[in-house]
Image (cartoon, coloured by chain):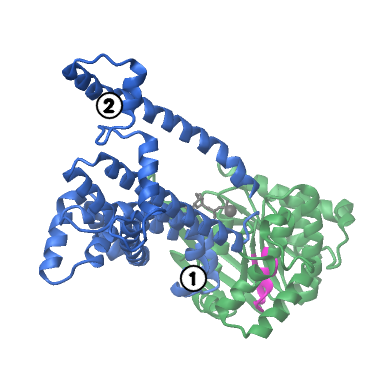
Amino acid sequence: MRRAAGDAGPVLCVLMAILVLWYAAAAALNLQWERDQAERAGRAPSLTQMLSAAMSQDRPVLPAPHQVAVEIWKTTVDKKITSKRSLVYHSWVTLSATLLGFAMGTLLGVLLAVGIVHSRALDLSLMPWIIASQTIPILAIAPMIIVVLNAVGISGLLPKALISTYLSFFPVAVGMVKGLRSPDAMQMDQMRTWSATTAQTFWKLRLPSSMPYLFASLKVAVAASLVGAIVGELPTGAVAGLGARLLAGSYYGQTIQIWSALVTASILAAALVAIVGAMHRRVLRRMGAAA
Amino acid sequence: MQAQASRTAAASDDAASRPAVIEARGLSLTFPADDGPVHALSDVDLTIRKGDFVSFIGPSGCGKTTFLRVIADLEQPTAGEVRVNGMTPREARLARAYGYVFQAAGLYPWRTIAANVRLPLEIMGYPREEQEERVRRTLELVNLTGFERKFPWQLSGGMQQRASIARALAFDADILLMDEPFGALDEIVRDHLNEQLLKLWAKTDKTIGFVTHSIPEAVYLSTRIVVMSPRPGRIIDVIESTLPRERPLDIRETPEFLEIAHRVREGLKAGHSYED
Ligand SMILES: Nc1ncnc2c1ncn2[C@@H]1O[C@H](COP(=O)(O)OP(=O)(O)O)[C@@H](O)[C@H]1O
Ligand SMILES: [Mg+2]
């Protein structure tokens, strides 16, 4: 707990710096439009007038932080969760696909790693494909996946979750291969002196040894899952989800809506990573780490 | 050699009547390497009898570890034969004939001391109550009663190594193979552990194979000292100790002790002169 309080200081500092930069950028980007407007109307407003106008445009090039904050407030606290305009509703749509994809990706990654560590044939045959899979730009194949799955009658949650799976299995597989191989030669010899079976070596030595690697991978994977779910909502013009809000916002030039969705997505990502981190600390404590 | 042999005749008579536990005949092991093969062991003959405490001493790279690993079925010999309790090393390993103590304690940081000692018992499928009983008994044997629920990082290096010895003793193997178990510990802790190891050996009647770099350690502990030399790894001398089985620490100042130590040192020197 004391550590959490100590950590907050630097985080707040960075947050302040981001806000300052954000305001500066918003002023710089939006002022031009105000200047043009004033010129056309033949007015000569003062800089302060122009600045305050630049911070409250309807469709700014870059909305100011407070505009985004107000928009998020209006679309979360002030809206019923069931409303199609509620960000909570859209977040949940994206989050459910993220979590499903994350679960499937973790399972797939762990299974692949277990296979690779125990079979030389799998190691040689699978590893190059796993690495090659990540060189394919997801944006290029996401529409195909969604369209193909729609054609065979699979729509909604699953296609998006599959894109999340595709993005999240990789860090888990790579991390777990490393983790399951982390016991040293002496530890493996020791198991042999006890004539331990492969399964016993796995459950009693390899798996516990791999926990730090697993959780490091899970943090990357959960963030990647969220990106995957959002990307999965873009190509088909989905009607719900943070990706849909991004898309709709860009159709209608609703920059404030776009940025609210973006900020919500980052808050969601930070929360997911924090939850994985908390799980990691719990597991470490149960495994006897110094408190 | 001759004089020495007759002086220890009484001891050897007794020894010859005890059954051979480990027998190596013409044992050789060559590791292939990029810069030519490494002859880790070359034509090694040795018999270790029940209840022996045999130390292996020699400079680094003379094949001490390799010899222990061949006995433990962790390395395959390229020539010759090893019998452990009359079986091949593989059969002996499967029959749980030996416990092996590595130089590093190698305790699992996520297991308590008791759970670490219980690990081989879990693997070997002992019933639950018997596991607890054996853990209790072996921890008592190495004076770690009361530390069951501690984690390894809460123990000193010496205590960790004692826990690892307990782990090797937890199942009833009658052979204990130890590869420089106290090599990383300071002298004071080491003396203490040596004393305890002798007591434990007297109590349990195990046969012990013990690798060390230290002459006093070898002489203090052993009934027989095997002096080895490198390139190729081979046995230079096997010295029967004339010391009594009961050995207080100050036995190390007696003339008898110093004489055996001297002979070990001579053996080591002879081994070295081969190289230059
Ligand atoms: N797995 C291996 N591969 C190649 N060479 C090895 C291997 N293990 C040991 N050796 C070599 O065999 C020789 C004997 O090694 P070792 O038995 O460990 O010596 P010691 O324990 O007496 O110091 C050394 O020269 C060492 O480099
Ligand atoms: Mg060695």
Q: Is residue A166 left or right of residue A103?
A: left
Asked whether the residues under marks 1 and 2 belong to the same chain, the reply is yes
Residue B174, magenta (yes or no): yes
Chain ID for label 2? A
Task: Identify which residue, A232 or A217, lies in the foreground.
Answer: A232
* Residue depicted at x 81% and y 57%: B192
Task: Identify which residue, B274 or B21, lies in the foreground.
Answer: B21
Secondary structure of the residue carrying tag 2 is: helix
Q: Quadrant of residue A141?
A: bottom left
Residue type indicated by callout 1: Trp
Mark before the other along the chain sequence, 1 or 2: 2
CA separation, marks 1 and 2?
59 Å
Task: Identify which residue, A118 or A8, lies in the foreground.
Answer: A8
Q: Quadrant of residue A232?
A: bottom left
Can the viewer see residue A199 in this picture? yes
Q: Which residue is mark 2?
A: A30
Residue type indicated by callout 2: Asn
Q: Quadrant of residue A117?
A: bottom left
**Residue farthest to the left, as pictured:** A151
Start-end of magenta stretch: B164-177
Instruction: Give percent across and percent down for residue A65.
Output: 38, 36
Instruction: Give percent across and percent down for residue A104.
Output: 32, 66
Chain in blue (letter): A
Instruction: Give percent across and percent down for residue A87.
Output: 34, 54
Q: Is residue A72 above or below residue B124?
A: above
Can the viewer see residue B33 in this picture? no
Secondary structure of the residue carrying tag 1 is: helix
Colour assigned to chain B in the rendering is green
* Residue depicted at x 62% and y 47%: B59
Q: Which mark is residue A203?
A: 1
